[in-house]
Image (spheres, grey):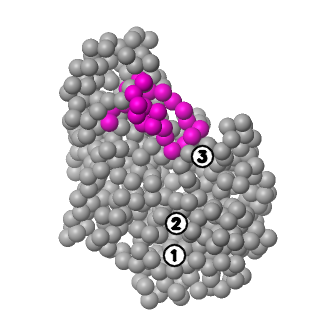
Amino acid sequence: MPDLEVVNTLGETLDERAIQEFKAGLRGEIIRPGDEAYDTARKVWNRLVDKHPGIIVRCAGTADVLSAVNFARNNALRVAVRSGGHNIAGNAICDGGVVIDLSRMKGIRIDPVRRIATAQPGLTWGEFDHETQAFDLAVTGCPQSTTGIAGFTIGGGFGHLARKHGLACDNLLSADVVTADGQLVTASAIKNPDLFWGMRGGGGNFGIVISFDFQLHPLGPVLGGWLIYPLSKAREALLFYRDYIASAPDELSTTVEFMNVPASPDFPSHLHGTGVVGIFVSYAGQPDKAEEVVRSLRNFGPAEVDLIRTMRYRDLQTIFDSLFPPGLLNYWTSAYLKDFDDDVVGVLLNHITNKPSPLSTVSITHLLGAVGRIGRDETAYSHRDAPFILTIRSMWTDPSESEKNVRWAREFWDSIRPHATGGVYANFLGIEQEELAGDAYGSSTSGRLQALKNKYDPANFFRFNVNIWPARRPETSQQFR
């Protein structure tokens, strides 16, 4: 017998026969407390999250997902959905309930003529890019290659190609979705367009996506990489960067990163451990214009280290990996900035010099371009007019230092709020996700999102996410709170 009983939301222990009958109907497998694979299967990327589900269902295909949803609903079990397991808040796992694990569902098919990728949710962006780049095609993906495609996309999804081609969710053509009542539906501009609207930024509130169709774009070699400056030149570099991006073409993506250089072959060894400010650039336009576009930025300073080179896009997508290794304790938060004025620069420099952990990083990413040309109400992702997003990533190794590292990030966030739009990025919300859900989705879409929740998940079956509460229905919704 497993060490932990499966208890439903009513406090009742689930009958063992029901579990065995469910197991017998799966093509995949279930993992339970006491199984050899359990501790590995329950771990997520963020070590700050430590939860113990009653059952982990590793689905082999759509039939397993349907079966798992019906089993959990019929037995009033809490449900978390896992794809890449990279979510900062640990939404991929829950205590005592069922984890519907999609990580083994890694099928992908590329149509190079129509430039469409049909992909299952267990893929990471590194795996996805490996397939699309075989045809010199790409779509906006996460700049961290180990992140799963599913949660990233339905939460919005900005990356190096966002200014040219829009967010990941803007390139979603259709999605096959398992709803809370155990139905498989297609969401697209033609079929269930209301659900399609919600899946583009509304997260996992409305169902489980078991297949994505993405519009791909031609993309050969790109020019990209780091320009590294010492912290003593941080203010000067930020002010120059601010002026430089004022006329940036859509093909140019830039991020300023305050970091201690990781011990990675991606960086010169003499910089390992050193606190620096890095400007990351990626140019995905005409190759003959690339050098001209980045010339003035490269000449500024000049940089202590210039790592910009021509490379495959799929290689560019792995460069950030060494900054965010698995197994660390993480607390992240974000804010969309109204501007990048002198006051913002002052707040940044003040808090960056006081970070308690050398592993922590802070970034400012330039948005707009194609992202801003979509109306704020056209998708559930509504932060279209924000020119920048600031991301505060507190990362450390010793659990005894959690309080001071979380406090640093929160105080930083409080200091930047007067300069922010009031919105936050849903994919970067941590333990405050419930209280900040309104800021994640924005007031302009809140009524429409709740109406969609009422229609597709009135009992709040899918609630381990940046949750949108349905209208109160005491006879059903309370059991899934």
Residue at left offset 45%, top offset 22%: 96
From the viewer's side, name the closer residue of 246 and 235: 235
- Residue 139: x and y in percent read 37, 64
Q: Is residue 117 left or right of residue 82?
A: left
* Res. 202 in view: no
Name the outermost residue toward the front: 36
Between marks 3 and 2, how big is the CA–CA gap?
A: 18 Å
Q: Which residues are magenta?
A: 34-58
Q: Looking at the picture, how far across and down is residue 88, in whole percent?
A: 54, 43
Amino acid identity at mark 1: Gly
What amino acid is at disc 3?
A: Leu
Question: Which residue is identified by label 1?
Answer: 224
Q: Is residue 297 magenta?
A: no
Q: CA distance from mark 1 to mark 3?
A: 27 Å
Q: Position of residue 369 (x, y in %)?
A: 48, 68
Mark earlier in primary sequence (1, 3)? 1
**Residue wearing tag 3:** 328
Label 2, label 1: how far apart the Cα atoms are? 10 Å
Q: Element at badge 1?
A: strand
Does 154 sit above or below residue 142?
Answer: above
User: Which secondary structure dominates the residues rendered in magenta?
Assistant: loop
Name the residue located 25 percent from the left edge and 40 percent from the top edge. Answer: 60
Q: Is residue 40 magenta?
A: yes
Tell me which residue sits at (21%, 35%) in the image: 27
Q: Is residue 27 left or right of residue 72?
A: left
- According to the image, label 2 marks what residue? 319
